[in-house]
Image (cartoon, coloured by chain):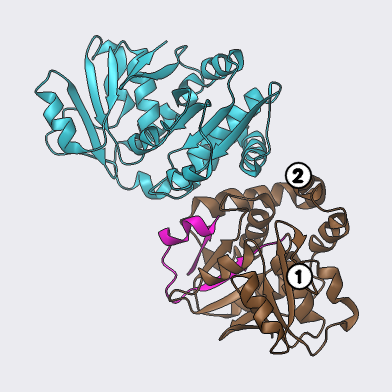
Chain colours: A cyan, B brown
Amino acid sequence: MKKLEICFSPELIHLHDLSQKNIVVVDIFRATSTMVTALANGVKSITPVADLETCREMSKEGFVIAGERNGFLADGFELGNSPLAYLHGKYAGKKIAMTTTNGTLAIEKSKLGSNEILIGAFLNLDTTAKYLAAQDQDILIHCAGWKGKFNLEDSLYAGALVSFLADQFEWECDGAIAMKNLYEQNAGQLKSFLNQAAHAKRLQNQNIEADIDFCLAMNQYEIVGKLVGQELLAF
Amino acid sequence: MKKLEICFSPELIHLHDLSQKNIVVVDIFRATSTMVTALANGVKSITPVADLETCREMSKEGFVIAGERNGFLADGFELGNSPLAYLHGKYAGKKIAMTTTNGTLAIEKSKLGSNEILIGAFLNLDTTAKYLAAQDQDILIHCAGWKGKFNLEDSLYAGALVSFLADQFEWECDGAIAMKNLYEQNAGQLKSFLNQAAHAKRLQNQNIEADIDFCLAMNQYEIVGKLVGQELLAF
């Protein structure tokens, strides 16, 4: 049987063997939710980049640049980290260069020997789960976390994915046991449960309430977001 | 209001500010459960040491030496890591030098600027919670984990302690939210829930079943285990 495991933070990824695994990187609030939304709304590609300066350079090459630091729009950037900005095909056909506080780092640290890197979100959970179930590879769910620490929304997504895949995977991973149970106990009240966690972050940005509601909507899109070379593409 | 937080692994402790905090180090299977049992059964002191060789040297100074690596008794050691060995005052009055795979490291990494270091176990949960509630300090619960990764039993103990202290502490810590909920949802079936996690470890040692039952018994002892200088003492 195929195996799955969860890593709660990029600070712990060195303890995991990535080789030949399919890695699902998740940063629910908001990097990977925004990436999935952008791809589902016709964006041509998203290039995750590590720093703001590289992003700014890429604007000269025709990229639309998106960047935030600690929840705020970065100076000189057209787009921040809100998924709502990409709705109704507003950036359809565009190439996006995106840097975020936690998400880009998690993608970068997922590369070492892995088979495929996907981006995870509640917005396309079912489609991603079906894609992973159809592959032969073991899975590692890589939570972007919050400045290196465990965070609730990424970990609950990991638990949801384990719950969806439980028939076809096995695990020797205490994180998977814990988060599957936590998700299943709280699936009917995901937003109120997560509100406890999102409180501090919500205060940083007056528009984030609409983003949170949007990021917690399940199965809005039927695409898989996958890294090909340096670009995230929709499949 | 006083604050509490959880750190899931010594690999993440550098992300936390320990200064002036009371740190509760927990390694349920089995280091801190064994330490609490030994102290409650009259052991004079326990000196946690980092490596087997230092422990062996200390046997020449009159210490009874206890050591395991990966669940097995270390070569040349009188005691392993089973709490059962200390029952009925068998080592009452003795000074113990103890090294373990994960627990000793977590204690060592808890020292930087902290106020007090306690050792946590289900066996004295209530007494430890009352002690912490009576102090003015913020708390950090430091899970020893398993070779750097999140583990279920230490994290559930952390959740239990948060649950016991919820009236007197507040937290901006997603780990505390998650583990409080997970503990409260599974408190009535702690052993069967943990059995999923303990499976692989139980296979490593045929006597561990009795240890597991013992380590999951709540509130058997009314002592607090606290580090004073280099020694753990009962209070």
Q: Which residue is mark 1?
A: B34
The mark total stands at 2
Note whether residue A216 is visible. Answer: no
Q: Which residue is mark 2?
A: B200
Task: Give neighbour class at mark 1: few <14, some 14-19, many 20+ (Cα, 10 Å).
Answer: many
User: Is residue B220 rendered to the left or right of residue B169?
Assistant: right
Relative horizontal placement of residue B187, taking residue A178 as reference (left or right): right
Residue B179 in view here: yes
Q: Residue at x 46, y 26 (%)?
A: A121
Vertical relation: B191 (above or below) A182: below
Quarter in which the C terminus of chain B is drawn: bottom right
Measure the C-alpha gap from mark 1 to mark 2.
Answer: 20 Å
Residue at point 60% right, 12% down? A134
Part of the protein shown in magenta: B1-28
Q: Is residue B106 left or right of residue B71?
A: left
Per the image, is B16 magenta? yes
Secondary structure under the numbered disc 2 in the rendered image: helix
Image quarter of residue A163:
top right
The numbered mark at residue A201 is: none
